[in-house]
Image: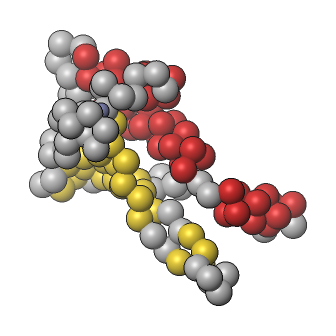
Amino acid sequence: MSDPDGFALDNEDEFLLNIDQTPLCPRCETRTKMVVRFSSSWKNGRAEEVPGLKEVVLCAACDHADPAAAELLALFTVDEGVTTSNMEMLGSLSAAWVESVRQRTVDEELLADEHERWLQGKL
Ligand SMILES: [Zn+2]
């Protein structure tokens, strides 16, 4: 489960995270700690499901107020940083953070649609 650019995690809500090559924060322009890509579909004008990919960055300066991000950021501030010993922790904290990001960025319409499908027992 590793590749030259970082590493991939497989779980039911698949996402890819990279802590080696991170972009600058679009908000404060400092180097981010982590970049995560996850699949996120949306509906086009004809109500067709369009598979998409979202990319979010974890910024120490901007995201520390978010509880899920704060826990994750704490991992990067320990002396050793992220190592094989806390990789598992990184994975589970990342999953929680990605989930909170998903919920924050999900569009209202999609949410209503998912709720509808959930009510119909399709999710
Ligand atoms: Zn920032």
Q: In which quarter of the image is residue 90?
A: top left
Percent across and percent down for residue 52 are 45, 70
Q: Tell me if residue 79 can be seen.
A: yes
Percent across and percent down for residue 13 are 51, 54
**Does residue 80 appear to the left or right of 101 in the view shown?**
left
Residue furthest to the top in view is: 79
Relative to 10, is 120 above or below? below
Residue at 19% x, 33% y is: 30
Q: In which quarter of the image is the C terminus?
A: bottom right
Residue at 51% x, 36% y is: 96
Q: Quadrant of residue 99?
A: top right
Percent across and percent down for residue 33 are 25, 33
Relative to 54, is 75 above or below? above
Residue furthest to the bottom in view is: 46
User: In the depicted view, which residue is nearer to us: 34 or 44?
Assistant: 44
Q: Tell me if residue 19 can be seen.
A: no
Residue furthest to the right in view is: 120
The image's colour scheme reads secondary structure
Residue at 23% x, 27% y is: 82
Ligand 1 placement by image quarter: top left
Residue at 31% x, 38% y is: 27
**Does residue 60 appear to the left or right of 80 in the view shown?**
right
**Does residue 80 appear to the left or right of 11 in the view shown?**
left
Q: How many marks?
A: 0
User: In the depicted view, which residue is nearer to us: 91 or 47?
Assistant: 47
**Does residue 107 appear to the left or right of 54 in the view shown?**
right
User: In the depicted view, which residue is nearer to us: 55 or 74?
Assistant: 55
Percent across and percent down for residue 25 are 26, 40
